[in-house]
């Protein structure tokens, strides 16, 4: 059997978790990552090509006889990197541009759910700020949710409790363009209450296989206070994702979404991330993503028993119906170590110590997000710096282990939440 060469595109904790998974596959003997980070370099040769440099990435894959390219990030997927690779006959894992719109446009995904009867919150789409304000004055029931249509690093969502807040939100998104062109169109959505759960899935265009559930913590500070971030920590599985919930979602959400995309002539191949809200009326879709969540990947992949390369190849080849996903009967918790001041203003380039503490420790992982090498020393290079993940027999044990492991790493402006997975103590 000829061993494979794999290229991973991205530079975050999610890509580190993917690289770690790929490195375990007996089918692979060489991994590249573009652009990668300090932690990924343990498994992969990092190459200085940006995630949005599609032609250069495809040139590299062609020149180095790469057998499979895995796209980790949302921006290149929505921008059409997969189409560039496919046009050259290169094997690539991820949705084409016309399918990645599932994440790239909130207005598209809401319209799709409405058309195919997939449960979600009531909403209206607006591309004129005056019309949006008129709607808020005449029809809106508060609290209400405003969402920038396009990609905004997980931050383009505002929950408004009053008309004044909503007016300010319309100005922020549509007039001041705080999230850039992502705010050209805006969705105004009914506010839903309940537990949030994330379910990741592999899709081959027609078949879907869901992974174990997870739950993310988006707010910067303890007690879910502070600004929205890309995610401050996560746990898996969610105790609130019961067999009844799973049955309902299988019947009304998961396959229905894959079928809807196929019916629209946008067959989806890759990862669909279902952001769900478990409401009093049943589970509803909050949002879709077209790739692994970050930090959800850091708790889901360490629990997966399958060879990730076999699963991804089955997706690309359209044979996912022959694969059954298997997960360990345990739990995992990830606590993000961030730079003090994230997500607003923070220093970079601060030396970090203690990585050797993770060597040969089974069930403990240090996934790098914002790191780089500077004079052979690992330094901080972002707001979210590391994802410290630990497994345990139970969620409580995994949580205890993860927080213990956060002490193994030191850097001057280290910041974290202390209540990741606290909900599991109440479950």
Image (cartoon, rainbow, N blue to C red):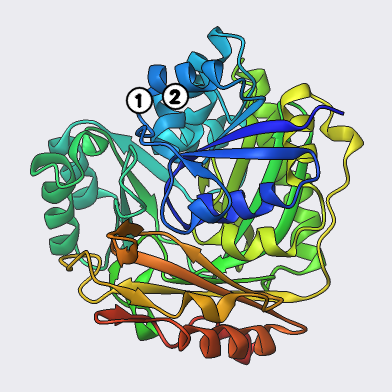
Q: Position of residue 73 (x, y in %)?
A: 46, 41
Which residue occupies the foreground of this view, 289 or 110?
Answer: 289
Question: Where is mark 2, residue-wise?
Answer: 57
Foreground: 240 or 384? Answer: 384
Q: Is residue 277 visible?
A: no
For the point 62% across and 62% down, the residue is 281
| Residue 302 in which image quadrant | bottom right
Which residue occupies 72% across, 36% down? 312
Q: Which mark is residue 53?
A: 1
Q: Is residue 125 visible?
A: yes
Q: Are marks 1 and 2 in contact (CB under 8 Å)?
A: yes
Work out which quarter of the rendered image holds the C terminus and state it.
bottom right
Residue 331's image quarter? bottom right
Give me the disc on residue 370.
none
Q: Secondary structure at mark 2?
A: helix
Percent x, y of residue 408:
48, 85
Q: What is the secondary structure assignment of the residue under circle 1? A: loop
Quadrant of the rendering where the N terminus is positioned: top right
Report x, y in % for residue 236.
66, 70
Examine the rendered structure and indicate whether residue 223 appears above or below residue 260: below
């Amino acid at each position: 059997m000829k061993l494979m060469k794999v290229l991973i595109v991205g530079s975050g904790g999610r890509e580190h978790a993917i690289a770690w998974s790929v490195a375990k596959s007996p089918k692979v003997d060489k991994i590249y990552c573009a652009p990668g980070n300090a932690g990924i370099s343990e498994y992969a040769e990092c190459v200085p090509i940006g995630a949005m440099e599609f032609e250069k990435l495809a040139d590299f894959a062609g020149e180095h006889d790469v057998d499979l390219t895995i796209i980790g990030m949302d921006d290149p997927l929505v921008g059409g990197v997969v189409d560039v690779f496919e046009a050259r006959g290169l094997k690539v894992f991820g949705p084409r541009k016309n399918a990645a719109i599932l994440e790239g446009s909130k207005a598209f995904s809401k319209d799709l759910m409405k058309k195919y009867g997939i449960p979600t919150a009531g909403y209206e789409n607006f591309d004129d700020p005056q019309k949006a304000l008129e709607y808020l004055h005449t029809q809106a029931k508060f609290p209400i949710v405003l969402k920038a249509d396009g990609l905004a690093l997980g931050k383009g969502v505002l929950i408004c409790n009053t008309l004044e807040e909503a007016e300010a939100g319309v100005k922020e998104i549509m007039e001041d363009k705080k999230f850039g062109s992502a705010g050209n169109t805006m969705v105004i959505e009914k506010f839903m209450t309940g537990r949030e759960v994330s379910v990741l899935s592999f899709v081959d265009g027609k078949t879907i296989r869901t992974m174990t559930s997870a739950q993310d913590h988006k707010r910067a500070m303890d007690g879910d206070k502070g600004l929205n971030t890309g995610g401050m920590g996560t746990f898996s599985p969610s105790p609130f994702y019961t067999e009844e919930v799973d049955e309902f979602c299988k019947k009304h959400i998961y396959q229905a979404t894959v079928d809807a995309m196929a019916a629209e002539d946008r067959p989806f191949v890759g990862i669909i991330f279902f952001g769900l809200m478990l409401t009093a009326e049943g589970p509803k879709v909050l949002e879709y993503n077209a790739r692994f969540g970050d930090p959800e990947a850091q708790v889901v992949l360490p629990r997966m028993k399958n060879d990730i390369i076999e699963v991804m190849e089955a997706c690309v080849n359209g044979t996912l119906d022959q694969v059954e996903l298997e997960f360990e009967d345990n739990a995992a918790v990830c606590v993000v170590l961030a730079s003090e001041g994230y997500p607003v203003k923070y220093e970079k380039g601060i030396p970090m110590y203690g990585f050797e503490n993770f060597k040969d420790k089974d069930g403990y992982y240090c996934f790098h997000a914002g790191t780089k090498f500077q004079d052979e020393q690992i330094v901080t290079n972002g707001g979210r710096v590391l994802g410290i993940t630990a497994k345990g027999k139970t969620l409580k044990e995994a949580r205890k282990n993860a927080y213990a492991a956060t002490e193994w790493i030191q850097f001057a402006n280290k910041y974290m939440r202390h209540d990741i997975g606290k909900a599991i103590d109440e479950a």
